[in-house]
Image (cartoon, rainbow, N blue to C red):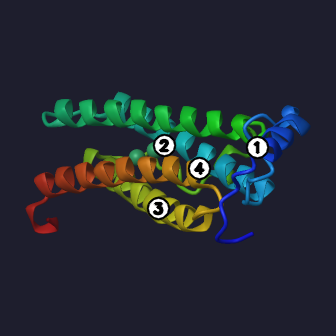
Amino acid sequence: MKGTFLTDVQEIRKRARQHVEQGAVTEGYRADRETVIKLLNEALATEIVCVLRYKRHYFMATGIHAEPVAKEFRQHAAEEQEHADEIAERITQLGGEPNLNPDGLLSRSHSEYAEGESLTDMIREDLIAERIAIDTYAEMARYFGEDDPTTRRMIEGILAKEEEHANDMADLLAAFDPTKG
Ligand SMILES: [Fe+2]
Ligand SMILES: [Fe+2]
């Protein structure tokens, strides 16, 4: 059927009626649903760990330079939470269940929960976590490709945000240590 567009309206309507319990997942869905859900649950764990790490950094940021940095940490925590919600929503659309079990959260996550001692440590750890997220989301987007364009577009949107986050952290790091620009 490759190259031909399904125009038989009757057929499309019949198919849609057949598996209504599958919600948004139709017979035209080409990706491996189980794998997509598993990958999205790993991404969900990653986002939650990022929320927790940025929250921790927000509350622990001290010193004369802390205020603008803490503000940035807080904003990132809120944006990681938005990502987590988007991903959880997509998992349910695909007929899966978002895994929000704190048990095993860290092992499902791609990024680490690094507390960091100084403000610079915290920023560096956040930059590392963002770079991990960028790599894994880029890989995921390639994997979803044309088989699940909706999930791919969502991940690409999140990826763009993580790139902004990484850039923010790199700028802060450079501001604290001009040799590391
Ligand atoms: Fe995120
Ligand atoms: Fe991020």
**Where does residue 6 sit, x and y in percent of width and height?**
70, 56
Residue picked out by circle 3: 132
- Of pointers 3 and 4, the one earlier in the residue sequence: 3
Q: Are marks 3 and 2 in contact (CB under 8 Å)?
A: no
Residue under circle 4? 151
Kind of residue sitting beneath label 2: Cys
Image quadrant containing the C terminus: bottom left
Q: Secondary structure at mark 1?
A: loop
**Mark 2: which secondary structure?**
helix
Q: Sequence-wise, which precedes: disc 3 or disc 1? A: 1
Q: Is residue 102 visible?
A: no
Using the numbered discs, state the Cα–Cα distance from disc 1 to disc 2 in whole angstroms: 29 Å
30 w.r.t. 80: above or below: below
Q: Earlier in the sequence, mark 3 or mark 2?
A: 2
Q: In the figure, 19 relative to 145: above or below?
A: above
Mark 2: is the Cβ under 8 angstroms from ligand 1?
yes
**Amino acid type, mark 3:** Ile
Quarter the N terminus occupies: bottom right
Q: Are marks 1 and 4 in contact (CB under 8 Å)?
A: no
C-alpha separation, residue under disc 3 versus residue under disc 4: 19 Å
> Quick one: label 1 or label 2, which is nearer the N terminus?
1
Residue appearing at x 81%, y 51% in the figure = 27
Q: Does the closest atom of ligand 2 sit within 8 Å of the Cβ of label 3?
A: no
- Give the amino acid at mark 1: Val
Q: Is residue 94 left or right of residue 50?
A: right
Q: Which residue is mark 2?
A: 50
Q: Position of residue 76 (x, y in %)?
A: 36, 37
